[in-house]
């Protein structure tokens, strides 16, 4: 089947933020208010924290209990899995019981594949989420369907016919709708036209938005989720741009990273994706998807909202604001298409030997102390040390340039410091931002733009610091994730007050969470919902215990075969609930073993990895 290439329609880096916000001066994106029960998403209202139940919806008491647990934990909107019309019928009793218990949080129904379930759910809840990838279009397993322009247009018509009645019903009942695109579940039709791209994600949602606009209905919220935070960041940016450029209303955004996993990895991945977007002012409601009890998601989400509030982030001191001539300086990075910033390839002398850095080389992880005699156990080793032979000079006006060194790192704290600095010859100088600088990502963006304007391709060292607490680590991940998503950074050091080992681990983990460099297996694990066919938490831990020593491999652990295969993105291997207590194994998107008893499945996965030559003995 021929597939149209994307790219031709990708905007050539126009801003995705609306004046007066800019990439150097954050401000919350202006959005229209969307009423959801007794809450409002968007406008000037605080970012709303939400989560989703993981119970079987037909188990009404269990679903009511978990809804109340979420509400008691501070969850402000609770979404309930609604796989079928039968589940949707249960919503009437669930909502009645929840209200009787005093919970006034709005309830949303989560619909995939089943327009009938949506039509039933809209009677009982305050918000209905549909997935444009599967509301009407189906994704054929295996072979993709053939399309041409005429059949694509016929598909658009079919969307209109199927979706418009739901829109009318929602409008009549005062129910909000979420058009929730997932990277992993784009329809064949969109894949044919746009490929597996952020444009496909955005266009998929806009097709449904046009139906709402034709029906004069504006109570809609968008989401553009992916398990790859970089893809999510680019998709939300592109959507913001498309709405603005197309003269559409600025509908609010529900921001999230899907299948983030569990533990610290899940928190860092969420911080990188959700945090980077919130810092830029994109996001009116968020859901952190952890493979844990959903109650655990709430404090993480609240922490992110607080840490990444654009109102608390100052503009880059002395930097350009929208409309300034200085803003015409190109940033030399792509907002919508991940590319590493172009940098020289430089060989740096380190106590560990020569380090080739820059260009397309992996972002190299460094430490400041305690010196060459300190080497941690395990594979994650420091690759450079800032020390005697690698001085860091502040770039303030008139600072003498140290001589006699192989490498000098010039560090700025504000834009003004770049005005008079006379850097050493290219190839011998690295640039960084003082971690104490306010608005670190903004200043790194400015630095990249300034270097491009000077015609310099010097390497950039990402430096940040944390007090070593989970919150401090999440804040660093949000700051650095934002910069890494733009392809900026050739070396990285995250100073943790906890220990040198913690510094090292955090830097590697942030690179992994940002999908920039892998140093341990990548686990794509769904958060679970009413469709889940096994205990996701314990299963993920069992699989992790068997495979944690592998590198450069990604394994998806997905609770059901309905959405799992589509949502597991680009994982190398998939472990998917096929039936109660039965597991199907995937290589890429191909199912290679069906319905293995759950007890035997982890070992079968190991054998599968071995048979594909990806196993190494621990
Ligand atoms: S993959 Fe299946 S079980 Fe997991 S969250 Fe999605 S729908 Fe639920």
Image (cartoon, rainbow, N blue to C red):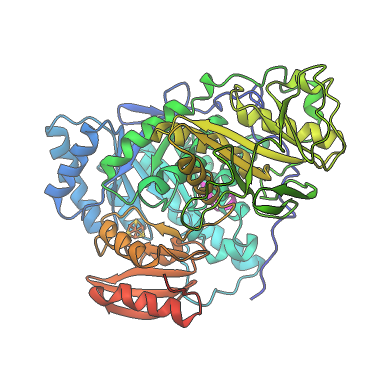
User: In the rendered view, would you say 277 is above or below 110?
Assistant: above
Relative depth, front residue between 117 and 527: 527
Magenta-colored span: 202-208
Pinpoint residue 281: horizontal percent, then vertical percent.
Answer: 55, 29
Pinpoint residue 187: horizontal percent, then vertical percent.
Answer: 51, 62
Q: How many marks?
A: 0
Relative depth, front residue between 557 and 197: 557
- The reply to whether residue 130 is visible in this rendering is yes
Kindly indicate the quadrant of the structure image that contains residue 66.
top left
User: In the rendered view, would you say 298 is above or below 86?
Assistant: above
| Most common SS among magenta residues | helix
Pinpoint residue 304: horizontal percent, then vertical percent.
Answer: 43, 32
Q: Residue at x 73, y 42 (%)?
A: 333
User: In the rendered view, would you say 458 is above or below 140?
Assistant: above
Q: Residue at x 39, y 40 (%)?
A: 287
Residue 86 part of the magenta-drawn span: no
* Left or right position of 89 against 239: left
Q: Residue at x 31, y 59 (%)?
A: 541
The N terminus lies in which quarter of the figure?
Answer: bottom right
* Left or right position of 122 against 59: right
- The reply to whether residue 591 is visible in this rendering is no
Pinpoint residue 507: horizontal percent, then vertical percent.
Answer: 53, 44
Ligand 1 found in image quarter: bottom left
Kindly indicate the quadrant of the structure image that contains residue 14.
top right
Q: Residue at x 49, y 77 (%)?
A: 142
């Amino acid at each position: 089947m021929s597939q149209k290439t994307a790219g031709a329609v990708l905007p050539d880096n126009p801003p995705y933020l609306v004046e007066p916000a800019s990439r150097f001066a954050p401000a919350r994106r202006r959005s229209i208010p969307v009423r959801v029960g007794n809450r409002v998403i968007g406008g000037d209202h605080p970012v709303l924290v939400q989560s989703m139940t993981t119970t079987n919806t037909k188990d009404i008491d269990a679903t009511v209990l978990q809804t109340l647990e979420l509400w008691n934990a501070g969850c402000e909107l609770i979404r309930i899995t609604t796989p079928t019309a039968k589940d949707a019928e249960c919503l009437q009793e669930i909502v009645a019981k929840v209200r009787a218990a005093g919970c006034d949080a709005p309830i949303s129904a989560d619909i995939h594949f089943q327009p009938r379930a949506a039509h039933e759910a809209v009677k009982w809840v305050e918000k209905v989420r549909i997935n444009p990838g599967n509301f009407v279009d189906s994704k054929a397993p295996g072979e993709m369907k053939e399309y041409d322009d005429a059949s694509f247009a016929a598909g658009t018509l079919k969307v209109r016919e199927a979706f418009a009645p739901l829109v009318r019903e929602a409008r009549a009942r005062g129910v909000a709708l979420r058009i929730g695109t997932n990277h992993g579940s784009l329809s064949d039709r969109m894949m044919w036209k746009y490929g597996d791209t952020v444009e496909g994600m955005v266009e998929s949602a806009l097709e449904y938005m046009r139906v709402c606009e034709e029906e004069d209905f504006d109570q809609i919220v968008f989401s553009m989720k992916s398990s790859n935070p970089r893809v999510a960041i680019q998709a939300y940016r592109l959507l913001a741009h498309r709405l603005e450029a197309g003269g559409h209303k600025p509908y609010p955004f529900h921001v999230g990273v899907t299948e983030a996993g569990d533990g610290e990895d899940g928190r860092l991945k969420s911080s990188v994706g959700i945090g980077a977007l919130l810092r830029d002012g994109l996001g009116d409601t968020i859901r952190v998807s952890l493979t844990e009890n959903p109650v655990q998601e709430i404090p993480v989400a609240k922490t992110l909202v607080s840490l990444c509030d654009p109102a608390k982030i100052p503009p880059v001191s002395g930097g350009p604001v929208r409309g300034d001539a200085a803003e015409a300086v190109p940033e030399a990075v792509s907002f919508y298409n991940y590319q590493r910033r172009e940098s020289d390839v430089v060989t740096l002398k380190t106590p560990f030997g020569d380090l080739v850095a820059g260009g397309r080389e992996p972002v190299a992880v460094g430490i400041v102390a305690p010196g060459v005699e300190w080497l941690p156990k395990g594979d994650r080793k420091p690759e450079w040390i800032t020390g005697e032979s690698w001085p860091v000079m502040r770039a303030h006006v008139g600072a003498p340039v140290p001589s006699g060194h192989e490498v000098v790192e010039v560090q700025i704290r504000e834009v003004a410091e770049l005005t008079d600095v006379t850097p050493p010859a290219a190839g011998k100088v690295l640039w960084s931002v003082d971690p104490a600088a306010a608005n670190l990502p903004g200043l790194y963006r400015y630095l990249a733009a300034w270097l491009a304007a000077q015609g310099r391709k010097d390497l950039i060292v990402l430096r940040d610091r944390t007090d070593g607490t989970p919150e401090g680590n999440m804040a660093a991940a949000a700051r650095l994730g934002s910069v890494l998503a733009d392809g900026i950074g050739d070396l990285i050091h995250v100073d943790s007050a906890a220990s040198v080992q913690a510094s090292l681990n955090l830097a590697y983990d942030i690179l992994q969470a940002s999908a920039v460099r892998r140093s341990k297996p990548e686990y794509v694990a769904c958060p679970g919902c009413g469709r889940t066919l096994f205990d996701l938490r314990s299963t993920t831990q069992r699989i992790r215990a068997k495979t944690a020593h592998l590198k450069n491999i990604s394994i998806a652990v997905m609770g059901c075969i309905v959405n799992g295969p589509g949502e597991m993105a680009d994982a190398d291997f998939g472990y998917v609930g096929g039936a109660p207590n039965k597991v199907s194994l995937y290589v890429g998107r191909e199912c290679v073993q069906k319905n293995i008893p759950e007890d035997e499945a982890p070992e079968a996965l190991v054998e599968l990895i071995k048979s594909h030559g990806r196993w190494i003995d621990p």
